[in-house]
Amino acid sequence: MTAPERKRTVRLEKPNMDRVQIRIPLVTGDPFASLDMLNICQYTLRSYANAPCYGFKGPLVTSIEIDLADKTVAADPRKAWTDVATALRQRTPTAALGTYISGAHLRTLGMMTKYPPECIDTTKLDRSATLSQLSPEGDPYVNLDSQTARIAFANAISSEFKSRQQLAGGLGLNFLFLDNIQHPGAKAPYCPQWPNTLDFLTTLGRQIHNLGAKVVVNSTLSPWYAAAADIPALASAVDGLTFEIPLHPVWCRPYLDRVNREFSAYRTWLNAGMMIGLYAVRGAGQTDQDVANEQRFLAAVAMLVRDPGQAILIARPFHIPRPEWFDWPARFGAPQGPYTVVPGTPVVLKRVFANGEITVNATAASNVATSGSAVLATFH
């Protein structure tokens, strides 16, 4: 079996390499008693004023991106970024805030669509560090199979991150959100050898740690499909991982052994102190309700695998009210044991908590038509 093609969307501590847990200090209780995470990027900043109580609540924000297509802020995107970051800190001062950079390719300055820029500028690396092959967006890939290019790219990213820390000032940047990290199990126009990718991430992680921050990576890796050695290797290289098609609906959810394998990977990373983020990516023809059903399923998955204090978070839109699952960890209370398989069912899993239980039908969640019935959350 070959791995399925992955649909892509266009879109902190002392300086050492020890595993350092992302922990957001709240006044009391579980620092990750909320399950939701945010990416704040919108065509117009008016949306922030319309929904401040929605968009600035949550333990983690992967990035604040100012869209340069918004003519109302294009003249001074730096001020717009500072205004949004200030509003975030005023409403949720303990949230972990990241900044987005692509970890695969470069882009010319005039082609950037976001502020801060979504890619490293092509002028920051020698031409010999890039490949002639271009990304689907027409950007040159960095040759991560070259040690010289890997080091130069890591240096350029850490330098850019440092400049963004200076921009943020007292608002603080807690982590680098590095996108487009390709795993050989997924189809991509260019996919570096996995040991070379890990070497790049380790080199970059050391530099970002030296700046007092962490590295969270968005990867095409499919945990149910990856080689067993790839799972702990990532725990040694980065501080967090996010996935855009977790528990693949076709290739993973209908099969109990694959679901268990993916859950085992999550447990390995969570026990190593890492943050995991799960995205519900809208498919062709899907409605807002379909996406909401997927988010609720992923929230239930988080409850099946997390222990108190562990950070497995579900991405949600910032412009609508927080969903009813966002505070499940606090409402359900402590788990009374690991999840179990409901006897006589294909892939139905249950976990009991102090204040209730959650049952997840992964088979139902593999089909949009039945995904709305995939989760049963019952409180005592």
Image (cartoon, grey):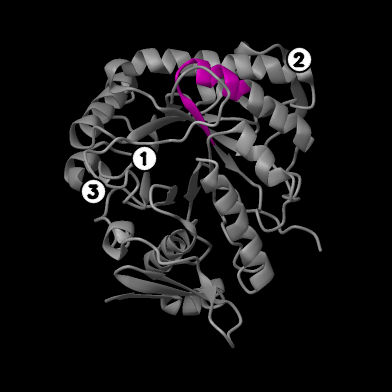
Residue identifier under label 1: 60
Residue identifier under label 2: 148
**Quarter containing the C terminus:** bottom left
Residue 299 is marked as none
Q: Which residues are magenta?
A: 204-216
Structural distance between the alpha carbons of marks 1 and 2: 34 Å
For this rendering, which residue is in front, 65 or 364? 364
For this rendering, which residue is in front, 380 or 40? 380
Q: Quadrant of residue 193?
A: top right
Amino acid carrying mark 3 in the image: Tyr
Q: Residues within 10 Å of mark 2 (few under 14, many from 20)?
A: few
Q: Taking 346 as reference, is 275 above or below it?
A: above
Tell me which residue sits at (53%, 25%) in the image. Answer: 111
Structural distance between the alpha carbons of marks 2 and 3: 44 Å
Tell me which residue sits at (52%, 78%) in the image. Answer: 364
Q: Is residue 43 visible?
A: yes
Structural distance between the alpha carbons of marks 1 and 3: 13 Å
State which tag comes first along the sequence, 1 or 3. 3
Amino acid carrying mark 1 in the image: Leu
Q: Nearer the viewer, mark 1 or mark 2?
A: 1
User: SS at mark 1?
Assistant: strand
Tell me which residue sits at (63%, 34%) in the image. Answer: 236
